Image (cartoon, rainbow, N blue to C red):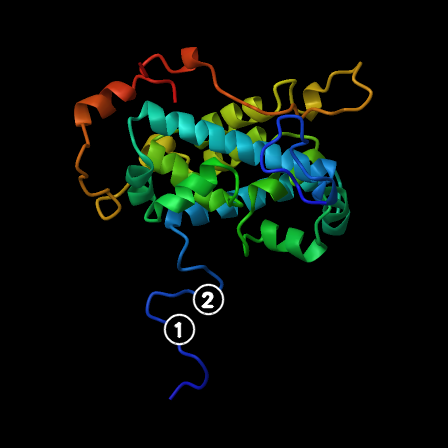
Amino acid sequence: MIPPLFDDDAPFWWPWEQPSARDREGYALRRGIGVVVRHTRQCRHMNRLALATRLHTSPSFVTRLERAQRELTVTAFLSTCRALDVEPAAMMAAAQEEAFPLGWHGDRVMDDPTGQLVLPFPMTLGEESCPVVP
Amino acid sequence: MPRGPVSPPGFTEGTNPRVSEPGRLLSVALGNVIRRRRLARALEVRELAALAGLHKGTMCRIELSRIQVRTDDLVRIAVALETSPVDLIAEAVAEAFPGGWATVSLGQDEAPPSLPGDDLSALSMAMACPW
């Protein structure tokens, strides 16, 4: 089976690479971090090159970080927070809220029998969260 | 004459020279936080590793900050400890940087060079952004 190049109705993960629920949660948080990093970078009026210069890395690293195509360590997360001048707990809270809009496991919805907390994409931050960006 | 490979100057055994000092502090603090949470729940390393779906050696190295924790593993550990990644990160940051996050600023050697198009006034205006 050859996957189509573009199909709105296609699942996000192909059937042969369907990850487990744990991997989906990890990927969701990674995706949330990427969304928050991109949003923060744009709030700072920085391009990828400027952020990459602060991180002493390449712009492609920033691209993969924002697109959740790169596994992120806590050290790299801290470096990103330092480069963006954001408190790590605040950024992680925003990423967690972005990744799990229904709440974390402690806030699990009791009437949800499946326990699926990961919502489908796209995940976007509201423009009202950054009033500086025109 | 020492035998075997010679460590470069400034290299301490058991540390990663590519990790910055704040990153090392955060890794150590995160390992301590995970260990405290595990002991509070009366779990052994292998039990927590089984709950998190990780190898017990990996879990032990995480607690000893021998390896860097990935965010994916952080989610698994948080689920196993019935907490959230935010709580783990917040507690680790508070332990690693008792003086506050403001003290962990980019040093002069890490300051980015000025780039064409950099507008400091726009950057200072952007500081009003909650993020």
Q: Secondary structure at mark 2?
A: loop
Position of residue A39 measured from the top left corner of the image (x, y, whole percent)? 41, 25
Q: Which mark is residue A132?
A: none
Tell if the residue under mark 2 belongs to the same chain as the one under mark 1: yes
Query: Residue A7 sits in which quadrant?
Result: top right
Chain under numbered label 2 = B
**Residue under the image location 37 percent in, 89 percent down:** B1
Identify the element where label 1 is drawn.
Answer: loop
Q: Residue at x 63, y 44 (%)?
A: B35
Give the answer, above or below, for where B63 lies relative to B11. above
Q: Position of residue A62 (x, y in %)?
A: 40, 41
Q: Residue at x 31, y 34 (%)?
A: A47
Distance (Cα) linking label 2 and label 1: 8 Å
User: With respect to residue B52, does B4 lie above or below?
Assistant: below
Q: Amino acid at mark 1?
A: Ser
State the residue at coordinates (46%, 60%).
Answer: B15
Question: Which comes sooner in the sequence, label 2 or label 1?
Answer: 1
**Which residue is label 1 attached to?**
B7
Residue farthest to the right, as pictured? A113
State if disc 1 and disc 2 touch (CB < 8 Å): yes
Nearest the viewer among B90 and A133 is A133
In this view of the protein, can residue B29 be seen by the observer? yes
Q: Judge whether B84 appears above or below A79 on screen.
A: above
Evaluate whether residue B88 shows in this view: no
Which image quadrant: the C terminus of chain A?
top left
| Amino acid at pointer 2 | Glu
The chain identifier of the residue carrying mark 1 reads B
**Image side of residue B119 versus residue A67, left or right:** left
Q: Residue beneath label 2, please? A: B13
